[in-house]
Amino acid sequence: MDWEPGLSIWKQIEKQLLADISDGVFAPGDKMPTEMELVRRFGVNRHTVRRAMAALVDSNVVRVEQGRGAFVQEQILDYPLGSKTRFSQIVSGRHRLPDKRLVSSEVLKATATVAQFLDVKPGTRVIELFSVSEADGVPLAVATSYLPAARFDGIVEIFVETKSLTEAFKRFGIDDYSRKTTRISATLPSSRVANLLKQARNRPVISTESVDVDSAGVPIEYGVTAFSSDRVQLIVE
C-alpha cells in the first residue's frame, strides 16, 4: 500500500478498511481480518493496527466480541412498539425484505404464567409457536408465541403457509387486533436462541413479553421475544 504523506499511517489503514466495508468486501455481520492478518497486509506493527481498529469501533462501524474477534456492525432497525405492532409492515417500511420461519410447534398445557396472560385456566391446551424473524436474511428476533388451542385449531399450517400471525389470524375472523401490554428487559440468550440469532451467548438480547387482544379485548396471543440488541432498536410509542 502506498502511504499518503502527512497523514498518520493508522488513519490511512482506517480509511482503507472503511473503503473495504463500503465496497462490500466485508458485509454487515462479517468477521474482520485478525490483528495478525492486518499486520501482514499493511506491513505495520500491531499497535498501528489496533489504533485503526479502535477508531472503527469508536465510530460504531465495527464491534468487538470477546473471544470471537471483530465484526462489521449490522444495520440497526428502528422497531416501534405500539398498539399496532406488525413485524412485516415495520420491516417492509424500512425497505427491507421480511421473513418469518417456524422452527417448532407444540400443543401444551398452559402454565400458571401463560394462563394468566391468556386469561384461561392453568392446564388449558395452548399452541406454542417458536419462530425466527428476519430482514434481508439476517435474523432479528426469536419469538415464542402461545395461542389458545380451542380457538386456533389448525393455525400452525396456516402460519407456515403465510409466514405471518397477522395473516393467520384473519383466517379465524380476526381482521384487527392490538397490543395490550409489553414488558421490556435485557438478558443473555440461551444457547438455542443465540444460535438462531447467529450471535455469541455473551451478547445481550432485548427481551419483550407481550399480550395481544382482539377487538373485544380477549387475549389471543402471549409472546416472549428475544431481539438482537446489535440489529434492533426498540422505540416505545
Image (tube, helix red, strand yellow):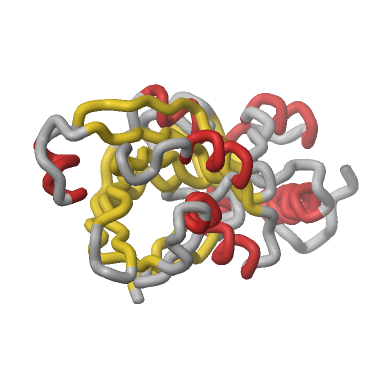
Q: Quadrant of residue 215?
A: bottom left
Q: Position of residue 38 (x, y in %)?
A: 71, 32
Does any portion of residue 72 appear in the rendered image? no
Left or right side of 118 for 158 = right
Residue 141 position in % (x across, y down)? 46, 44
Residue at 41 percent of width and 47 percent of height? 227
Residue in view at x 24 percent, y 67 percent: 217
Total numbered circles: 0
- Quarter of the image for residue 76 reads bottom right
Image spot of residue 140 (x, y percent): 51, 46
The quarter in which the C terminus is drawn is: bottom left
Q: Is residue 178 left or right of residue 104?
A: left
Quadrant in which the N terminus is drawn: top right
Q: Quadrant of residue 94?
A: bottom right
Give above or below for 67 relative to 70. above
Task: Pick out the residue farthest to the right.
Answer: 2
Q: Nearer the viewer, residue 101 or 72?
A: 101
Name the residue rendered at 32%, 47% in the picture: 223
Is residue 82 in view?
yes
Q: Position of residue 151 (x, y in %)?
A: 33, 45
Residue depicted at x 37% and y 71%: 82
Which is more toward the observer, 19 or 219? 219
Q: Nearer the viewer, residue 2 or 33?
A: 33
Residue 75 or 155: which is nearer the viewer? 155
